[in-house]
Structures are given as C-alpha cells and as structure tokens.
Amino acid sequence: MLNTDNFIISDYLGKTFSCRCGKEHFVPIVSIIIEPEALNKLPDMISSIGCKKPFLVYDLTTYSIVGQKLQELIKLIKIPYTSYVIKDAEPIPDEKVLGEVLIHFDPACDFIVAVGSGTINDLCRFLSFKLNLPYMIIATAPSMDGFASNVTPLIVNHMKTTYEAHTPYAILGDTSILKNAPIKMIAAGVGDILGKYTCLTDWEIAHCINNEYRCNELVTIVNRSIQTVIDNIELAKSRDSKAISGIMEGLVLSGIAMSFAGNSRPASGSEHHLSHYWEMMFLFQGKQQILHGTKVGIGTVAVLKAYELLFERKVDFTNAESIALSYSQKDWETQMKLTYFDAADSVIALEKEIGKNNPINVLPRLKQLEKNWDEIKKIAQRLPSADAIRNLLSSLDAPADPMAVGIDKITFINSFLVAKELRNRYGLLQILFDLGLTQEIAEQVWEYFQQ
Ligand SMILES: [Zn+2]
Ligand SMILES: [Zn+2]
C-alpha cells in the first residue's frame, strides 16, 4: 500500500503504487533533478532516451537566460538540434502560439525540450502529447506547480480549458538558475502552492456532500508540498539555494499528486477558478497578463475570506430551497453572455451537459449540506485565516488583493458569480450559488480587501 511518509522525490517515480483509495497511482516521469548545475546533466539525459535530434522551445526571456549554455551542452554529444524562440517575453498558451510553435516544429526531431516555466511547459506538454513524442522540462523559475502534471491548461475559443496531455520524461531544475528568477516569479510559485489550502478544503467538502472520489494519500502528498514550501519561504527571500530547491520540490510534488489522481482535483479548486476567470477577462480586455500563481494567491485569500464569512453566519436552508426552485435557465444564459462574452457558448454547452445549477441537482445537494453543516464547518475551520495568507503574500512583496493587479469590482464580483461555470467541480463557489449567497458574500469579500 502506498505510504509516502519517508519518500524523497525520486521515490515517487517509475513505480505503480496500489493505494487504499482503490486506485493504482503511477507517474511515468523517469528523472527529476533539482540541484545546483543540474543543467550539466542535459547531455546524459538526451543520450539516455536515445534522442537523435531534440527540438528546443524557448521564449525571448528563457532564451536569454540559458539559450547559449544549452547549445554548448548539446554540442558535447554531437547531435543536431533545432531551436525555436517564441517571439514574446511572456507568451500566452492559446491557439495562436500553439500554432506558431507547430509551424516551426522540425519533423526530423524526436524529442521536445521545453525551456521555461508556465506557458512554455503547457505548450510543449500538449504539443508533444499530440505528436506522440517524449518531452522534458528545463525549469527557469519556480513559478507554478504544473511541472510534473499530466494535464495542460490552454486558452481555446477564449475559454480556459484543461486538456489531457502527458507527463515529461524528465524535469531539470538548476537551482543556480532558479534562485536568480525574479522574486515575483518565486512569489507566484508560493501563491500557487498556498492555493492548495482552499483546494483541499473544496475537495474534502465535495467528498462529504457528493461522495466524490478522494484519496487520503494524495492529500498527504499535497499537504507535504504546502509544508515544504512554507518551511522555505523565509530563506527564499534571500535567494538561498537550498530554500529555492525546497520550493521547487514542493511545486513538483503538487504536480505528482495531480498525475497520481489523473486530474487536477488535488491542486485546483475555487481559488483557481477565480484565477482562470480573471485571466480570461484580462485577455478580452487586452490587458497585460498577471502570473498564474500571483492570481491564485489573491484567489486563495478571497476564498479563505468567503469561507470565514459563510460559516460565521446562520444559513437559512428554507430560503435557499426557494431560491434554487426559482432558477431560470434563460436568465442564467443571459448572465453568461454578459460575463463570458465570446466564451459564453462553451460555458452554456457545458451546463447543458451537466446541469449543475438545475434544481434537480441543487436541491439534493442542499439537503446534504444541511445535514452535514457542522462537519463541513469543522473542515473549513482548519483553514488558515485570510489575514494570515494575505500577510504572508505581502511579506514576499507579492500582490495580496485584487486591486493591486488591476482587477476591478465588477470583474471581482462576476468571478464569484460565474467562475465556477468553467468546470464541473463542486467547491466554495458552487456552495455559495446553491445557498443563494454569492452576491452578498462576494460584496463582503470585496469590502474586506478595501480595509
Ligand atoms: Zn490513492
Ligand atoms: Zn496552479
């Protein structure tokens, strides 16, 4: 039986674990190396997979950081290679950039090397999956937790959607490079991990209310990933190599939990849904994007505050039932068109398929909520306070409220109302909807951020 108590990162790899949850957990990553000068392992790694010609993908930033060094390293093993540099310092993972990389892909290549963090990983994970080629990651910043993940978030038809993909063959995290990443990227990695608090709470409540699959061992792994990051925050501020390595390990671990689960449930909850909605709105408005983990950090504070406000109050379940019964699909569709613009059709199609807002599904959930109220209150009360996480983000000079990154009140309130429509995933935002309390609590959370 899977027991990860004394595991180091390499113990998670290459084995199939039978688990008490009834699943077999497996992550097909062959190698994860997080250490100073890890880049020097690249030639051996490329040789070990029998690669004849790698395709290296950079953006302008990552090329300037490691482009030259990687070319010198590949020359050591005397094989040809092709590079493509995306002509953007901060590309977006959408159809356009994906198409751009595909157009420049060299079909003689048999291995893809993603050089960067975030978007570059998302693009290469998806492209290599579709091309049925192995890929590896050379991380340049500990800025997000998707390194070891087997799913990939892309923006398609203006909609942030998670697609099936595959895990990398290897992950190289050279701490001599990672520690020099801009502090806002390190803080974003921390923000992505802080989101696991609310995400695990959403998952536990979903298990309690809807009997959704949940694995205790995966929860343990994600909790360990949170702890590893928290333990290293102080020293990371001074760019201590060991602390940065700890943060990178925590981020990788969270991705392993996602791969073990086969979906993003262990690592993405209401805080991520808020973040996805803000990202889509920024794209519609042509605004400069904010780092994923920065948004998740702010989303986490918002969700923590909403949980606090929800359980401070006395909930009127009879009133909630009558609100649920007065639901109008037509009015809801109008609301989607006003809040999702060009992405409204995809959101409406998803709801037609699953009907999560239909009273047929809401009323039984309300019954379960009422019956288990004290138990889920106890689950939520184990969370850190919104103030504690807000202060922690501020201590890293990271934005800790929506206004600091240019999210206005309308976008913020709308995100509480409709971000949950991007996925069929029960959590805080759906609970507020079911209880008919979203608008009121969202307004209160916004007020909290004004203090
Ligand atoms: Zn399990
Ligand atoms: Zn994330």
Image (spheres, helix red, strand yellow):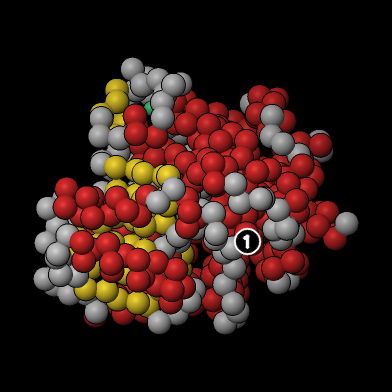
Q: Is residue 57 visible?
A: yes
Q: Residue furthest right?
A: 451
Q: Is residue 378 above or below residue 237?
A: above
Q: Residue at x 72, y 30 (%)?
A: 381
**Count of labels in the image:** 1
Residue 181 appears at what percent x and percent y?
54, 60
Q: Is residue 436 visible?
A: no
In this view, the residue in front, 47 or 193, is 47
Q: Judging from the image, what secondary structure is the residue with disc 1 in?
A: helix
Task: Tell me if the residue at label 1 has its CB under 8 Å from ligand 2.
Answer: no
Q: Residue at x 54, y 46 (%)?
A: 241
Dividing the image into 4 quarters, which one contains the C terminus? bottom right
Q: Is residue 427 above or below residue 415?
A: above
Q: Give the residue pinned by disc 1.
A: 184
Q: Residue at x 55, y 78 (%)?
A: 284
Dividing the picture into quadrants, the one containing residue 439 is bottom right
From the viewer's perspective, tell me whether residue 286 is left or right of residue 39. Answer: right
Residue 110 appears at what percent x and percent y?
14, 62
Residue 15 appears at what percent x and percent y?
25, 30
Q: Residue at x 33, y 17 (%)?
A: 1
From the viewer's perspective, tell me whether residue 76 is left or right of residue 289. Answer: left
Residue 231 appears at what percent x and percent y?
62, 36
Q: Is residue 256 above or below residue 215?
A: below
At label 1, the amino acid type is Lys
In this view, the residue in front, 322 or 349, is 349
Q: Residues within 10 Å of mark 1 (few under 14, many from 20)?
A: some
From the viewer's perspective, tell me whether residue 369 is left or right of residue 264. Answer: right
